[in-house]
Image (tube, rainbow, N blue to C red):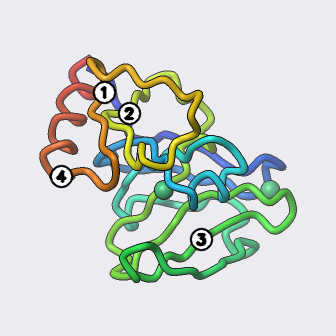
Amino acid sequence: MTSLENMEGGCQCGNIRYRINASPHILYTCHCSDCQKQSSSAFGMSLIVDTAAVEFVNGDADLKFWDTRGGDGKLKRCAFCPDCGTRLYHGSEDDQQISIKAGSLDDTSQLQPIAHIWLRSAQPWVVFERDKFHCFQQEPDNEEALAQQWQKHTLNR
Ligand SMILES: [Zn+2]
Ligand SMILES: [Zn+2]
């Protein structure tokens, strides 16, 4: 059984370091135009975890924030390293859960997303394995059901 607890990650320059002290809820990739912009790449990887489970072991006082609003109008607090610019997580309005930008983890070898979302705006050359991943034109229909499926897959491997 794979344990996803105590995963560690950090920014590119190494000043900001975090540890996740509980199993995450779900991992998906998002191809919306915001995620393409924030990652400066083709898509974002969102690892949803309880805010309380994320412990900053170095540099948390240096974190900088940029606030924006998502398509749903809700506040999105984007945390990044001011020295190297790595985006580390997005906070939500209620702050119960945050979305760790999963590319900042030290070891991503145990992680596989359950879904690709916002295909509507995906770059045209990205090819989706629709028999392996749930694919959504926009938001997933039932994120909770997906999360349960992801946990079952990921933790029982
Ligand atoms: Zn940095
Ligand atoms: Zn997105």
Q: Which residue is mark 3?
A: 78
**Sequence-first tag of 4 and 1:** 1
Q: Is mark 3 within 8 Å of ligand 2?
A: no
From the viewer's perspective, is residue 128 above or below residue 135?
Answer: above
User: Which residue lies under the disc numbered 4?
Assistant: 141
Q: In 3D space, how far apart are the residues under numbered discs 3 and 2 (Cα atoms)?
A: 21 Å
Rendered-image quadrant of the C terminus: top left
Of helix, strand and loop, which one carries label 4?
A: loop
- The amino acid pointed to by label 2 is Pro
Taking 49 as reference, is 134 left or right?
left
Q: Residues within 10 Å of mark 2 (few under 14, many from 20)?
A: some
Give whichever of discs 3 and 2 has the lower sequence position. 3
Q: Position of residue 97 (x, y in %)?
A: 35, 66
Q: Is residue 148 above or below residue 142?
A: above
**Residue at x-position 73% and y-position 55%:** 86
Amino acid type, residue under disc 4 in the picture: Asp
Q: Mark 1 to mark 3: distance in Å?
A: 27 Å
The residue that mark 1 highlights is 133
Lower sequence index among marks 2 and 4: 2
121 or 85: nearer the eye? 121
Residue kind at label 3, given as amino acid type? Cys
Mark toward the viewer: 1 or 3: 1
Q: Are marks 2 and 1 in contact (CB under 8 Å)?
A: yes
Q: Tag 2's secondary structure?
A: loop
Dots 3, 4 in contact, CB < 8 A? no
* 3D distance between C-alphas at marks 2 and 4: 16 Å
**What percent of the width, then of the height, locates residue 101?**
55, 51
Q: Please rate how many residues cluster around mark 1, counting C-alpha atoms within 10 Å: few if below 14, some from 14 to 19, many from 20.
A: some
Upstream in sequence: badge 2 or badge 1: 2
* Kind of residue at badge 1: Phe
